[in-house]
Amino acid sequence: MTDGAKSWLLHGGVIIVLFALQSVLPAYHHGNLARIMVLASYAIGYNILFGYTGLLSLGHALFFASGMYGMGLSIQFLGLSPGPALLAGLLAALVVTSVVGFLALRTTGVAFMIVTLMFAQAGYLTVLLFGQYTRGDEGFVIQQSQRVFAGIDLSDPVSRYYAALVLFGTCLIISLVLVRSNLGRVLVAIRENEDRVRMLGFNVFRHKLIAVILSGVISGAAGATYGLLFGYAGATFATVEYSIFPLLWVLLGGAGTTLGPFMGVLFMFYLIDLSSAVTSAYMLIAGVALVLLTLFARQGLVGEVRKRLAPWLP
Amino acid sequence: MELGPYLLLASLEGAVQAAVLALTAVGLSLVFGTMRVVNIAHGEFFMLGAVLAWWLTSQVGGDASIGFVLALIIVPIVTGLLAAAIDWTILKRLDYDPEATIVATIGVLYIIQQVTLMTYGPDARPVPPPFNIRITLPWFGYSGYKLFVIGAAIVLLLGVWATVSKTRIGLILRATQLDSDIAQAFGIRVKRVYSIVFGVGAGLAAMAAVLIVPIQQAHYLMGGDPLLLSFIVVILGGLGSLRGTVVAAVLIGMSDGIISVFFSPTLAKILATLLVASVLVFRPQGLFGKRPV
Amino acid sequence: MAAMNLISTTGLGRNFGGLKAVHDVDFDLPEGQIRALIGPNGAGKTTFVNLLCGRIAASEGRVTFLGEDVTALAAHDRIAMGMAYTFQITSIFARLSCHENVALAVQRRLGNDRAAIDAQVIAALDAVGMADRVSQIAGDLSYGHQRLLEIAMGLGQKPRLLILDEPTQGLADSEIEDFVTLVRSIAHETTILLIEHNMNVVMQTADYISVLNFGEILAEGKPDEIHANGDVQAAYLGTR
């Protein structure tokens, strides 16, 4: 069987399993998995830029939150229904990502990290500054009645799960297609040796910008969907923590693998879930995990599997 | 409403902030200038300085000034040693790879912060100032201690400058900064210099916190703002330029104080962060730095 | 001369501060030629070649490629027009396979046709004698093979102009012999500009030689002429 066929079978299988799980999971894990799938979509978006193109952003919460607020504010103040509101969220993410990408890509390495961090901080502070509309840290609830999409009540757990699965499945397929395409090959090459890519005739800046926009829009889609499915938009999702989470998830699951982001979110979610029962300092786990990962397992879970067992994993 | 008194008050408050910020930022700048790594946990060393100062002064009885002086000496040393240990066990193993170091120090940030949460708790606790003199200025009386803070910071900064430019240790430091390979070829134990620099950087931040904690209170989340502001200052001033760092600290401290008094603090912060981003994008060498980032 | 010059420069120069690394160079390379660019260390050969392919911007003068003024054109655009460049210090994708390395060079011309890409990757690797190493990771190759891989990447682009910057640097004698054979075999496909220090290689491959010294053209001519040229010998001070 070709590598391509194996990859498609595996990814299709994952989606089918998630689909089947819907009917058997107990309520608590059912809700968790819906959340995990949306956050995994955010992680997939981050992975495209970090894992595949090799650009470490510390400001992705800005893109996630742009989607969330683009969606939330249009429901709240423009009275849009979920469908158009989602599109508004995507549009907001697209605009923000394009502007930030265009400016930030003039820097590299450490400077790029700091610039993205700064833009995200400015975004968070702007949300607070306009607290009159955004309700700042407190956030605002999106009513159940406002979350009915084509007759489906998105606050119903089953519909919510399926909606999350649709988002995740789409993002997963997009990442698989990307990775196996010519564009994906260029992005990986940029990560490996940017100068060489330039001297093979590629416009490196344009390719990086494409990667940033793709990454940011997917992150924004996740943000918009999260707000819609869980009925809330708040400034917490624009904080530095929400920029660090996708980095942590992707590192843990395996940067530069398509299934890594999901595994990372799944693992981290339950790790924090279990430890927050014990202490309020659950971010300690995140801290320890980050240190251990960078020291001993920079490939992450799926990355190690790929290295040792299955080199064909995309 | 007279502008004068508000302006003087804002300037003095700004000067206090600038003083503490300059010390903290110089710590960060030393580390980046020598080791070429960004320490995201720097703000937590600041916080540790404040928390440890609270703990020490609450243990030591007698006059508040005794506890304070002890804290001023012991706390930076303890914090510095902890930082050196972190460098030895973690950063050295990563071979100071820029991206890995950032990720690892983010992890260290959360570890220090959360352990403090678990032991010290979520409350903010005050530390009594070592003395309570009020200085009479035109229009109003002002805290003598705050003026002391400004003076102490100036003295310390001059000390750092003198050490770096005039002593043998400073020469070793500058040599390692310029070219660590050649320095090593000349017999300088570069790895050891790195640990010392990392420790000193943390120690300076801790000392700044000990100075400010009688004015502010000690809280486990107080590292966030100093981290952000130090970043802003170091980048504006030019990474690796001590003089630039101090000038930028004065600029940021004063303008933050003035903008905060006359406009909203949030707006001031937004402008500051966008300023950093702009500098990195359009003028990466900052105001004084020579190398592009 | 009315013959089509593939690439030419007029008054090309580049300053670094006060240093004139390349100064007032008029250079013409007709299509189909194998040209060697020689000169002592520090003569400005790599700088000149970087000016040609656009990695460095010119301080003065013009570069004309395929009849177009490309002086203001970015490096990647010039490459896309039909130049290929191999680095003085081999620059490949060490963590990727040989296939992926060459595929990147090939795909720009071929779009999404996976089968066509695979075929041309094999062809390019075959031309340098490495068709059996398709799946090998580039970083695991010996230095000599890595240099060959880079040449394969150059060939994969099907360039009009192939620039080789000190290609035999660090190669064993047998590998150098193979390289000479390789150059002769691909000469009909592309025009070759070769920076070289190894005079044996130069004498065996070049149709024409340009000598650079202190950033200026010292002499140009056929190999025998250059070999006998007193100024060139003086400039090299004993290099045979």
Image: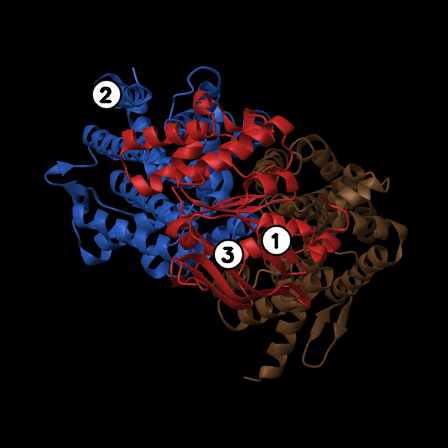
Q: Colour of chain C?
A: red
Identify the element where label 3 is drawn. Answer: helix
Q: Residue at x 17, y 55 (%)?
A: A79
Q: CA distance from mark 3 to mark 2?
A: 55 Å
Q: Chain of mark 1?
A: C
Identify the element where label 2 is drawn. Answer: helix
Look at label 2 and name its amino acid. Answer: Ile
Q: Is residue A48 left or right of residue B138?
A: left
Q: CA distance from mark 3 to mark 1?
A: 11 Å
Q: Are marks 2 and 1 on the same chain?
A: no
Q: Residue at x 48, y 55 (%)?
A: C29
Q: Position of residue C238 (x, y in %)?
A: 77, 47
Who comes first in sequence, dot 3 or dot 1? 1
The residue that label 1 is drawn on is C45
Look at label 3 and name its amino acid. Answer: Leu
Up the image or down, C11 lies above or below A162; here it is: below
Q: Position of residue C28 (x, y in %)?
A: 49, 59
**Towards the viewer: A180 or A242:** A180
Q: Position of residue A307 (x, y in %)?
A: 48, 20
The residue that label 2 is drawn on is A16
The residue that label 3 is drawn on is C52
Look at label 1 and name its amino acid. Answer: Lys
